[in-house]
Amino acid sequence: MTATINRPFLKWAGGKSKLAARISEVLPEASCLVEPFVGAGSIFLNTDFDRYVLCDINPDLINTFSQLKNQPSQFIADAQALFLPVNNNDAMFRQLKARFNSTSDKYEKALLFVYLNRFCFNGLCRYNKSGEFNVAFGKYKDPYFPAEEMVAFASKLERAELHCRGFDITFKHIPADSVVYCDPPYLPASDTANFTAYSAEGFGIVHQRYLAHLAKTCVVPVIISNADTAQSRALYTGAELQFFDVQRSISCSTDNREKAQELLAVYNKEQQERAA
C-alpha cells in the first residue's frame, strides 16, 4: 500500500514530494528537524518531528509562511479571493505582478506570492538582478487553489520556527538533538541545466563547497540532496552516498519526462568525528 503524500500548497522547482518517503527513511531520530533550504516544505510536511526550524534565504517564501501561520483562516480566504477568472489573463497577471514587486505591505505581498505561484509559468520562482519577480504568465485554464493544502500546512506550522536567513547563519544556530536536511539548488547535470536563481544572489560552486564543509563539521547529523554528478561525488567525499533515479519534467508538458540521477549525502557522527 502506497503511503499518502502530503503535498505543499506552493509549486516549487525541485520539490521533494515524490522523494519524501525515501528521504524520511534516511533521517535519524531527533527531536527537531532543521531545514536551511525549506522551499515549499515537502519534507517538513511528510515527517513527524516534535519541532522544526524552517529557514530559507527567500524573504517572500518565509513571509508567506509567516502570514499563513499568524492568521490562517483569514489568509486562506483572502488568497482565494484572488483566484478569479478576471485575474486569469496576461494583463491582470502583469498588473498584480507589478503590485507584488512594488508593495511594502507584507500581508498583501504574501497573498500575491500565492497568486503568482499558481498563475505563473510552471510555478517558477525567479527574480531579476533588481530582486523583482519576473516569471511570465502561465496561461492555465483554471489555476487550482490549494485550500486543503494550506489548512494542513498552517496546522503543522504550529510546531515550527521560521527564519529568513542564509544556510551559513542557520548552521550557527543548530539546536541540540537535531538533524539537518539540506535541499540546496542542485549542481548542474549539464552545461545547459544550470538554474540556480532561487534568489537574486544565486547559488554557485563556492556556496556548494561551503555547505559541504559545514555538513562535515556539524555536531549533529546532516543529510544533503543533490544531483548525482562527478562533481557532487567529489564534493561529498567522506559522506555515506546513496544513489537513485527520479523522474523529472523537462518541459512545460507533463508528458515529456526523463530519468535524472540524484544522490543523498549522509553525514553521521562517525564521519563528522573523522573530519574534525
Image: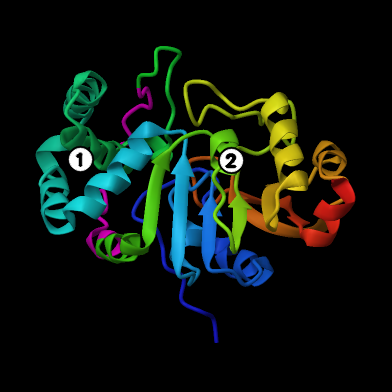
In percent of width and height, residue 206 lies at 71, 25
Q: Position of residue 59 (x, y in %)?
A: 37, 33
Which mark sits nearer the N-terminus, 1 or 2? 1
User: Of residues 140 and 27, which is closer to you in this image?
Assistant: 27
In this rendering, would 151 be left or right of 8?
Answer: left
Q: How did the renderer colour the structure?
A: rainbow
Label 2 SS:
loop
Image-quadrant location for residue 171: top right
User: Residue at position x 17%, y 37% from top?
Assistant: 107
Horizontal side, residue 207 vs residue 267: left or right = left
Which kind of residue does numbered mark 1 sit on?
Answer: Leu
Q: Please name the amino acid that badge 2 sits on.
A: Lys
- Give the residues in magenta: 133-150
The residue pinned by badge 2 equals 172
Q: Which mark is residue 47?
A: none
SS at mark 1? helix
Question: Can see residue 192?
Answer: no
Mark 1 or mark 2, whichever is nearer to me: 2
